Amino acid sequence: MIPLSVLDLSPVPEGLEAGDALRNSADLARHAEALGYNRYWMAEHHNMPGIASAATAVALAHVAQGTRRIRLGAGGVMLPNHAPYIIAEQFGTLDALYPGRIDLGLGRAPGSDQIAARAMRRNLEGADDFPQDVMELMRYFEAPEPGQSLRAIPGAGSNIPVWILGSSTYGAQLAAMLGLPYAFASHFAPQMMMDAIAIYRRSFRPSPHLAAPYVMLGVSIVAAETDAEARFLFSSLQQSFINLRTGRPGKLPRPVEGFDTNLDPRARAVLAQTLSCAVVGGPETVRRDLAAFIAHTGADELMVTANIHDHGARRRSFEILAHAHQGMAAAA
């Protein structure tokens, strides 16, 4: 059975603050480790009131303190926002503190709006230096050569696994060319998922980093005791996407009973476009739909996100999913 991992956006629920969200993330990381999840990744977003993981390396250091085994990483760092050398130092530091457990997923999008991008002094002139920046960053993780004048300290010689993230075929082509593992954002942009997977696998070139293609897919999974309860909890994420797409980003809303029954056509189209891969339901529904998604995509690993307003219900969702996954593995 393929591994399951966690993507945590450190959601800030209505009524709480960023500190609460980050403490919830630390608790969820411990919980995920105890349940047997493979990785725990956090993502860089800026100027978004409902996401507390903007300083991704700092947030990862916080959640790492209470774990011992689970892999930790960025899903991802938006590399155009940063000098590759600085990211090498940050993740080299994480690897020095938690050796052999750090992943680094790299994205090409800014993870922000234009205002935040300018505030980060990002180059907005249209030049795409992402492939060059990825290769530069990876060189900082290699063992230093004699006489090398610039080293990432910590970082040099760490050989931290680098992943390419994407929501289109661009990242698939780059990951295949560099021989790196590939993670696709099907949890919010599933339209090009199958095309990207096919391109990546067809074009993959083996490298010292990876001998064969490896695809991890993001998927939103909300599990509860019943299908009805899961749909109720899922309404928080539905509201978030509609708010974001209509220019009203905010904290993670409280769930609303029967939310999707009164949606206007435009809102319904937004959700159909962004959340078509979501798995929502009780244990049997989750087991069935999860198996169907894995069979359809041929994914090597799934990275699960669950933006649920109540932290206890979020913990329970990951428990139900873990038990469903264990049952599928036993049956296989």
Image (cartoon, helix red, strand yellow):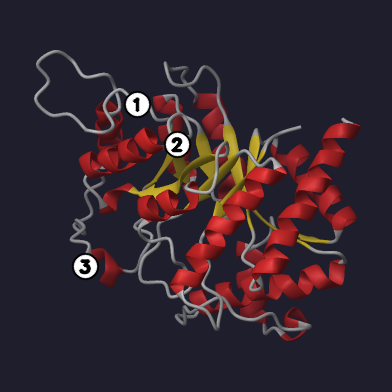
At x 65%, y 62%, the residue is: 275
* Disc 3 residue type (three-letter): Ala
Cβ atoms at labels 2 and 3 below 8 Å apart: no
Q: Position of residue 202 (x, y in %)?
A: 55, 26
Cβ atoms at labels 1 and 2 below 8 Å apart: yes
* Disc 1 residue type (three-letter): Ser
Q: Position of residue 173 (x, y in %)?
A: 44, 34
Q: Which residue is mark 3?
A: 119
* Distance from the alpha carbon under mark 3 to that under mark 1: 31 Å
Residue 133 - label: none
| Image quadrant containing the C terminus | top right
Which is nearer the eye, 230 or 273? 230
Q: Which residue is mark 2?
A: 102
Which is nearer the eye, 177 or 133? 133
* Disc 2 residue type (three-letter): Ile
Residue 158 - label: 1
Residue sticking out furthest to the top: 146
